[in-house]
Amino acid sequence: MTPIYSFPPIEPENARILILGSMPGVASLEAQQYYAHPRNAFWPIMGELFGAHPELPYHNRVEILKAEGIAVWDVLESCVRVGSLDADIDEGSLKVNDFESFFRRHPDIRHVVFNGAKAEQSFRRYALPELRLDYLSYTRLPSTSPAHAAMKLENKCKAWQTIYHVLYL
Protein backbone atom coordinates (compact mmCIF):
# COMPACT_ATOMS: atom_id res chain seq x y z
CA MET A 1 0.00 0.00 0.00
CA THR A 2 1.00 3.57 -0.60
CA PRO A 3 1.74 5.67 2.49
CA ILE A 4 -0.26 8.77 3.29
CA TYR A 5 1.43 11.97 4.42
CA SER A 6 0.44 14.62 6.89
CA PHE A 7 0.93 18.29 6.12
CA PRO A 8 2.99 21.08 7.67
CA PRO A 9 2.12 22.34 11.12
CA ILE A 10 0.20 25.44 11.96
CA GLU A 11 3.05 27.09 13.82
CA PRO A 12 2.92 30.67 14.98
CA GLU A 13 6.23 32.17 16.02
CA ASN A 14 4.80 32.86 19.47
CA ALA A 15 3.45 29.33 19.98
CA ARG A 16 2.91 28.49 23.65
CA ILE A 17 0.87 25.30 23.27
CA LEU A 18 0.92 22.46 20.75
CA ILE A 19 -2.16 20.43 19.88
CA LEU A 20 -1.23 17.06 18.41
CA GLY A 21 -3.43 14.71 16.43
CA SER A 22 -2.27 11.35 15.13
CA MET A 23 -2.70 11.57 11.33
CA PRO A 24 -5.25 13.53 9.28
CA GLY A 25 -8.29 11.61 8.12
CA VAL A 26 -9.36 11.22 4.51
CA ALA A 27 -11.49 14.40 4.45
CA SER A 28 -8.63 16.46 5.89
CA LEU A 29 -6.08 15.00 3.49
CA GLU A 30 -8.35 15.72 0.52
CA ALA A 31 -8.99 19.30 1.69
CA GLN A 32 -5.39 19.80 2.90
CA GLN A 33 -6.87 21.29 6.08
CA TYR A 34 -6.66 20.20 9.66
CA TYR A 35 -9.89 18.65 10.99
CA ALA A 36 -11.84 19.11 7.73
CA HIS A 37 -14.45 16.38 8.36
CA PRO A 38 -17.77 18.22 8.88
CA ARG A 39 -18.59 16.16 11.99
CA ASN A 40 -15.19 16.61 13.63
CA ALA A 41 -15.64 18.66 16.81
CA PHE A 42 -12.27 20.44 16.64
CA TRP A 43 -13.41 23.63 14.91
CA PRO A 44 -16.70 23.92 16.84
CA ILE A 45 -14.64 23.66 20.05
CA MET A 46 -12.07 26.19 18.83
CA GLY A 47 -15.00 28.42 17.89
CA GLU A 48 -16.40 28.27 21.40
CA LEU A 49 -13.03 28.83 23.05
CA PHE A 50 -11.33 31.33 20.73
CA GLY A 51 -13.79 32.44 18.04
CA ALA A 52 -12.35 30.16 15.31
CA HIS A 53 -15.84 29.04 14.29
CA PRO A 54 -16.21 26.43 11.54
CA GLU A 55 -18.29 28.87 9.45
CA LEU A 56 -15.21 31.07 8.97
CA PRO A 57 -12.89 30.41 6.03
CA TYR A 58 -10.12 28.00 6.98
CA HIS A 59 -7.33 30.58 6.70
CA ASN A 60 -9.19 32.85 9.14
CA ARG A 61 -9.54 30.02 11.66
CA VAL A 62 -5.84 29.28 11.33
CA GLU A 63 -4.95 32.94 11.88
CA ILE A 64 -7.11 33.04 15.03
CA LEU A 65 -5.29 30.05 16.48
CA LYS A 66 -1.93 31.56 15.57
CA ALA A 67 -2.88 34.84 17.28
CA GLU A 68 -3.66 32.83 20.43
CA GLY A 69 -0.24 31.13 20.33
CA ILE A 70 -1.68 27.73 19.44
CA ALA A 71 0.28 25.37 17.18
CA VAL A 72 -1.40 22.35 15.56
CA TRP A 73 0.35 19.33 14.10
CA ASP A 74 0.23 15.56 13.91
CA VAL A 75 2.50 13.02 15.53
CA LEU A 76 2.90 11.08 12.30
CA GLU A 77 4.55 12.38 9.17
CA SER A 78 3.42 9.33 7.22
CA CYS A 79 1.90 5.89 7.61
CA VAL A 80 -0.11 3.27 5.78
CA ARG A 81 -3.80 3.34 6.64
CA VAL A 82 -6.99 2.39 4.87
CA GLY A 83 -9.72 4.92 5.66
CA SER A 84 -9.58 7.43 8.49
CA LEU A 85 -9.58 5.39 11.69
CA ASP A 86 -6.51 5.46 13.92
CA ALA A 87 -7.13 1.79 14.66
CA ASP A 88 -6.38 1.01 11.00
CA ILE A 89 -2.88 2.53 11.01
CA ASP A 90 -0.21 -0.05 10.19
CA GLU A 91 2.16 0.34 13.15
CA GLY A 92 5.07 -0.95 11.10
CA SER A 93 4.69 1.86 8.57
CA LEU A 94 4.88 4.83 10.96
CA LYS A 95 7.23 7.71 10.38
CA VAL A 96 7.17 10.35 13.12
CA ASN A 97 7.44 14.08 12.50
CA ASP A 98 10.66 15.91 13.46
CA PHE A 99 9.76 17.17 16.92
CA GLU A 100 13.31 18.03 17.89
CA SER A 101 13.48 20.70 15.17
CA PHE A 102 9.93 21.81 15.88
CA PHE A 103 10.56 22.45 19.59
CA ARG A 104 13.86 24.17 18.77
CA ARG A 105 11.89 26.59 16.54
CA HIS A 106 9.29 27.11 19.28
CA PRO A 107 11.08 27.44 22.62
CA ASP A 108 8.05 29.05 24.30
CA ILE A 109 5.90 25.92 24.03
CA ARG A 110 5.49 24.47 27.48
CA HIS A 111 2.39 22.33 27.04
CA VAL A 112 1.45 19.60 24.58
CA VAL A 113 -2.20 18.61 24.24
CA PHE A 114 -3.11 15.31 22.61
CA ASN A 115 -6.28 15.12 20.57
CA GLY A 116 -7.19 11.62 21.67
CA ALA A 117 -5.47 8.47 22.85
CA LYS A 118 -3.74 7.44 19.60
CA ALA A 119 -1.92 10.77 19.36
CA GLU A 120 -0.69 10.42 22.93
CA GLN A 121 0.32 6.77 22.55
CA SER A 122 2.19 7.41 19.30
CA PHE A 123 4.00 10.46 20.67
CA ARG A 124 5.02 8.77 23.92
CA ARG A 125 6.17 5.61 22.13
CA TYR A 126 7.85 6.98 19.01
CA ALA A 127 8.79 10.63 19.60
CA LEU A 128 9.26 11.25 23.32
CA PRO A 129 12.14 8.77 23.86
CA GLU A 130 14.25 10.79 21.40
CA LEU A 131 13.47 14.15 23.02
CA ARG A 132 15.22 15.60 26.04
CA LEU A 133 12.57 18.14 26.99
CA ASP A 134 11.78 17.87 30.67
CA TYR A 135 10.11 21.30 30.73
CA LEU A 136 7.05 20.16 28.74
CA SER A 137 3.79 19.10 30.34
CA TYR A 138 1.27 16.87 28.60
CA THR A 139 -2.51 16.52 28.63
CA ARG A 140 -4.66 14.05 26.72
CA LEU A 141 -8.09 15.39 25.83
CA PRO A 142 -11.05 13.57 24.32
CA SER A 143 -10.72 12.98 20.60
CA THR A 144 -12.62 15.44 18.45
CA SER A 145 -13.04 12.75 15.79
CA PRO A 146 -16.57 11.82 14.71
CA ALA A 147 -15.53 8.23 15.49
CA HIS A 148 -15.49 9.26 19.18
CA ALA A 149 -19.22 9.96 19.26
CA ALA A 150 -19.85 8.49 22.71
CA MET A 151 -19.08 11.87 24.28
CA LYS A 152 -21.37 14.81 23.57
CA LEU A 153 -19.94 17.99 22.04
CA GLU A 154 -20.83 19.94 25.18
CA ASN A 155 -18.72 17.60 27.32
CA LYS A 156 -15.84 17.62 24.86
CA CYS A 157 -15.91 21.40 24.89
CA LYS A 158 -15.74 21.45 28.70
CA ALA A 159 -12.75 19.13 28.65
CA TRP A 160 -11.00 21.19 25.97
CA GLN A 161 -11.29 24.32 28.12
CA THR A 162 -8.00 23.05 29.54
CA ILE A 163 -6.30 24.82 26.63
CA TYR A 164 -7.79 28.14 27.61
CA HIS A 165 -6.67 27.62 31.22
CA VAL A 166 -3.13 26.71 30.14
CA LEU A 167 -2.87 29.84 28.00
CA TYR A 168 -4.52 32.39 30.26
CA LEU A 169 -4.62 31.30 33.88
Image (cartoon, helix red, strand yellow):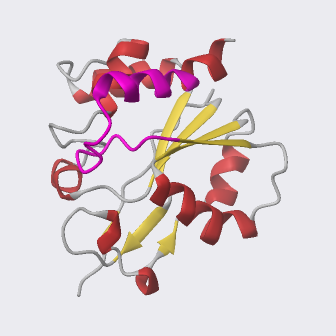
Taking the spot 53% from the left edge, 18% from the top edge, the residue there is: 68
Residue occupying image coordinates x 36% and y 14%: 48
Numbered range of the magenta stretch: 141-162
Quarter of the image with the N terminus in it: bottom left
| Along the viewing direction, whichever of 100 and 94 lies nearer the viewer | 94
Q: Is residue 45 magenta?
A: no
Total marks placed: 0
Q: Is residue 160 magenta?
A: yes
Position in image of residue 76 (x %, y %): 46, 64
The image shows residue 6, relative to residue 78, as above or below, that is: above
Is residue 83 left or right of 70 when viewed as pictured?
left
Identity of the residue drawn at 32% across and 36% down: 151
At x 81% / y 52%, what residue is drawn? 133
Quarter holding the C terminus is top right
Residue 131, percent from left and from top = 76, 62
| Residue that protrudes farthest toward the front in the picture | 150
Residue 58 percent coordinates (x, y): 24, 29
Asked whether, in this view, residue 32 is left or right of residue 50, the answer is left
Residue 165, by quadrant, is top right
Q: Nearer the viewer, residue 128 or 71?
A: 128
98, 135: nearer the viewer: 135
Specify whether 17 is left or right of 43. right
Residue 24: horizontal and vertical position, in percent? 31, 55
Judged left or right of residue 153, residue 93 is right
